[in-house]
Amino acid sequence: MLDAVWLIPALPLLGFAILVLGNRRIGEPWAGWLATLMIAGSFVAGAVTFAGLVERPEEERQHVYRVFTWVAAGGLDVDLGFLVDPLSMTMVLFVTGVGTLIHLYSIGYMHGDPGFHRFFAYLNLFAFSMLMLVLGDNLLVTFLGWEGVGACSYLLISFWFTSEANASAGKKAFVTNRIGDVGFMLAMFLSFVTLGTLSYVNGDGTGILENAAALSVAAATGIALLAFVGACGKSAQLPLFVWLPDAMAGPTPVSALIHAATMVTSGVYLLTRLSPVLLQAEDWVPTLIAVVGAATALFAATVAVAQRDIKKVLAYSTVSQLGYMFLAVGSGAYVAAVFHMITHAFFKALLFLGAGSVIHGLHEEQDMRRMGALKRFMPITAATFIVGWLAIAGVPPFAGFWSKDEILLYAYAKHPVLWAVGLVTALLTAFYMSRQVFMVFFGEPRWGGAVDGEHALHEDAPGESEAPSAEVAAAQAADHDGSAGAADHAGHGGVTPHESPWTMFVPLLVLAGLAVVGGGLNLPFEGTHFLADWLHPVVEATEAEIDVSDGTKVALAGVAVVAALLGIAAAALVYLRHRIDARRVEPDVLLQAWHYDQAISAFVGGPGRAGAEAAATADRTGIDGAVNGVATLVRNGGDRLRVVQTGLVRSYALSIAAGAVGLLAYFVVRTGI
């Protein structure tokens, strides 16, 4: 059963190949159903492999399936192989499971788009790359998938590439990820230099994970830090988070697939996989990871408070929740990190798809100030979105409460300051998610002709209104939902919100159910640590042990619940009861993300460009000048010497005679004759 693992990535790859070769001949909706069938088959293959692993005793839950020898050069011997263990199979199941639901949702969402078949080809290729990343049995195969998801994210984010904003967003994601990828590559090189292998497990004790104890502290620290740089790029941590909010330019299913359930969790997966190396590193390395995670979580949460685009709120929320996962990794809570990764995949995919349903129902409107009262017109979307809201806000018994509470517990054991930052972040999360729910689904309608007067929460002053987002502009041009013309788009009269088709709301219902019961994977009660027991063979030696009394645990959980309720209550005062002017809690500095993006643009366009031009000048005049100067000297010298080559025999004979006379004179002088 374990040898069926090759089918898991092979099926999405097959789907991609068929869609590419079939091109437009496989039109709508068959391209969507084919792609969905392939990823669903991958989920089934994953379930079969999972069942085969469960049957084994705990100490034998590790299997390497080698497909072929990929690289054999000198001391470098790399196989294309798959590592089947509890961590990789956990990733496979939720990646393919949530991916199947997103594929199904996309059939309805992308209806009428001229690039329908191309979109699903990209989705299948992305799924293949992500599965190679999590299943690879060595760093090079993992890096293959790592680069694959990066390339696919570029293709999907800039899917509507005729819009300049979309194309720029794709390039921004690609370039930013390349910065992190340098760290991954250097970590891979250093691992090979120090251990002589790239394989996680060789079976003879020489693999990276098996032999991590043989690493010197300096080498382990170097590998850990370089891997952390790569993880920061892919998982959007400070300072490399800037690509993810702009990535909302892609179609909404892309946001759900890449930025909720799969690609952005790659960094957390990598650090968890390399946890034995982190254990050998300097003690300050995990602390650094925890501090960066906590800072990212708090920073992104403050920014989400003021965003007006329904997807931008969720984008910064994703950055914040990823920060929570890094906080868990840095605190030694690897099980909690994976636990939150899973629950986050459930409720954040639900929220993104719910946002897509709202956008679809409002004919591409994304500004939350032009929404309101949608629960009456979109009851299924509203009900499922509210479930996702309660889960991410940390309200028990929804899934997000259990995973977030476990992270906060380990953060408290690591350092109370980290716990305090995490708690404030939890309060802000409850506030901005409640703000989103109240603005979108409750209150008075502000869509269609009701965007002025008392129904508007607050409007910009003249000249301050935001331009339509990239997705709005592109989707309006494509009119891919086929249900409204340009006159029915944002801010115009005649807009009537409508519920989405069944291909869109069925995934919402399934994800809502998972967001409710997902916390049951790892409850903090005796005999209910299912995920912890499952991951035990992988993280047994690296999971931190905490010494916190049961009373303290209950108190910490209670404080977290109170913080969530306070956040919800504060949002209700502002956005439901209007006791406080919304503009007072949405300063422009937060709307502009603390001007971080502008600062980077100013630096790159100012000193960065000047430095690049100076380097180019130095290269052109210094390095190239030296090379060209030597070539010029040789060429000119040759030109001077060429004049003695006349081609006349008598000139050569005279030269020979002169040389002979010269040699004779030399010997006469030397011998004294």
Image: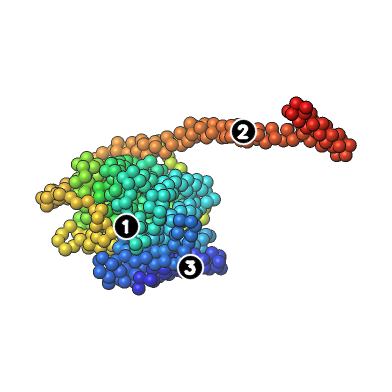
Position of residue 10 relative to residue 455, above or below, is: below
Viewer-proximal residue among 350 and 545: 545
Residue type at mark 2: give it.
Answer: Ala
Instruction: Residue 307: name its quadrant.
Output: top left
- The residue that label 2 is drawn on is 626
Residue type at mark 1: give it.
Answer: Glu
Contact? badges 3 and 2 (CB < 8 Å): no
Residue type at mark 3: give it.
Answer: Leu
Q: Earlier in the sequence, mark 3 or mark 2?
A: 3
Task: Report the side of 473 relative to 257 (left or right).
Answer: right
Identify the mark at residue 14; answer none if there is no mark.
3
- The residue that label 1 is drawn on is 210
Q: Residues within 10 Å of mark 2 (few under 14, many from 20)?
A: few
Could you give the CA–CA distance between mark 3 and mark 2, rounded to whole angstroms?
52 Å
What percent of the width, then of the height, locates residue 311?
A: 38, 50
Instruction: Residue 85: name its quadrant.
Output: bottom left
Quadrant the C terminus occupies: top right
User: In percent of the image, x 45 and y 56: which residue is there?
Assistant: 76
Identify the mark at residue 186; answer none if there is no mark.
none
What percent of the width, then of the height, locates residue 665?
A: 79, 28
User: In percent of the image, x 32 and y 57: which residue is there?
Assistant: 210
